[in-house]
Amino acid sequence: MEERYKESVLADNRLIDKMIEYFAGDPKRVQHFLKVYEFSTLIGLAEGLPEDELFILKTAAIVHDIGIRASEEKYGKSSGKLQEQEGPAVAEPLLTSLGYDEALIDRVLFLIANHHTYDAVEGEDYQILVEADFLVNLFEDGCSEETVRHVRNKIFKTKTGTRYLDFMFFSHLETENRMG
């Protein structure tokens, strides 16, 4: 088990290094994927995701927004749908060059191609990736309390992701109620 863990960490580090290089000069994108990666890891571990699924989730979290640059170059914008459309073609050769196996690559490409699609979530890895991305985006975008509540009610399903969202965005309300 210890050897597999070490291999997983090394694989994550190699991919993270490549993604930092890919997003050179764009610290916002680097910061974003690293935060999504960490939330994905934390939620996946707390929710008891099997080791193989956790590895897929972490890999997808690192590369989930890889389609942004291609979208901006082709269309001058990088909406979620364009990221989903452009991302897999950029991610596949990168993952292949780093020696990831075909089944893992297929699932990661599926997650990239759907990480902004919320009406047909298939699998815990998909759900956790969506929640981790929202935890980061809600903060980075400065979303209103109303938006956060809507996302919480419509999107969040895991106990851990919901708990993190509540602590991050609503703990001040609980504190005010206790003190008031």
Image (cartoon, rainbow, N blue to C red):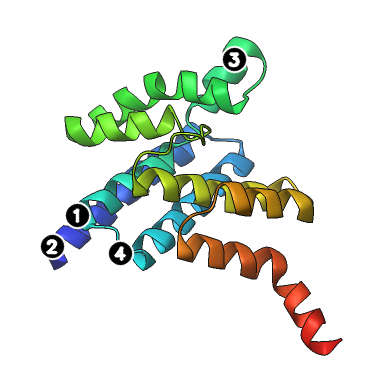
Look at mark 3 in the image and give the residue it sits on: 73
Count of number-bearing discs: 4
Residue at point 67%, 15% (across, down): 76
Q: Amino acid at mark 4?
A: Gly
Q: Quick check: 1 left or right of 29? A: left
Look at mark 2 in the image and give the residue it sits on: 3
Dot placed on the residue nearer the N-terminal end, 4 or 1: 1
Look at mark 4 in the image and give the residue it sits on: 48
Give how far apart the Cα atoms at labels 2 and 3 are. Answer: 41 Å
Query: Which mark lies nearer to you, 4 or 3?
Result: 4
Give how far apart the Cα atoms at labels 4 and 1 are. Answer: 20 Å
Residue at point 23%, 57% (across, down): 50
Label 2 residue SS: helix
Label 1 residue SS: helix
Which quadrant of the structure image shows residue 87?
top left
Residue 155 location, x and y as percent?
55, 47
Q: Amino acid at mark 1?
A: Glu
Is disc 1 surrounded by few (<14), some (14 to 19) or many (20+) residues within 10 Å?
few
User: Who is closer to the viewer here, 84 or 178?
Assistant: 178
Give how far apart the Cα atoms at labels 3 and 1 are. Answer: 35 Å
Look at mark 1 in the image and give the residue it sits on: 7
Res 154 seen here: yes
Q: Amino acid at mark 3?
A: Glu
Give how far apart the Cα atoms at labels 2 and 4 are. Answer: 20 Å
User: Who is closer to the viewer here, 101 or 156?
Assistant: 156
Is disc 3 surrounded by few (<14), some (14 to 19) or many (20+) residues within 10 Å?
few
Query: Which mark lies nearer to you, 2 or 4?
Result: 4
Q: Is residue 118 above or below residue 87?
A: below
* Dots 1, 2 in contact, CB < 8 A: yes
Query: Which mark lies nearer to you, 4 or 1?
Result: 4
* Dots 2, 4 in contact, CB < 8 A: no
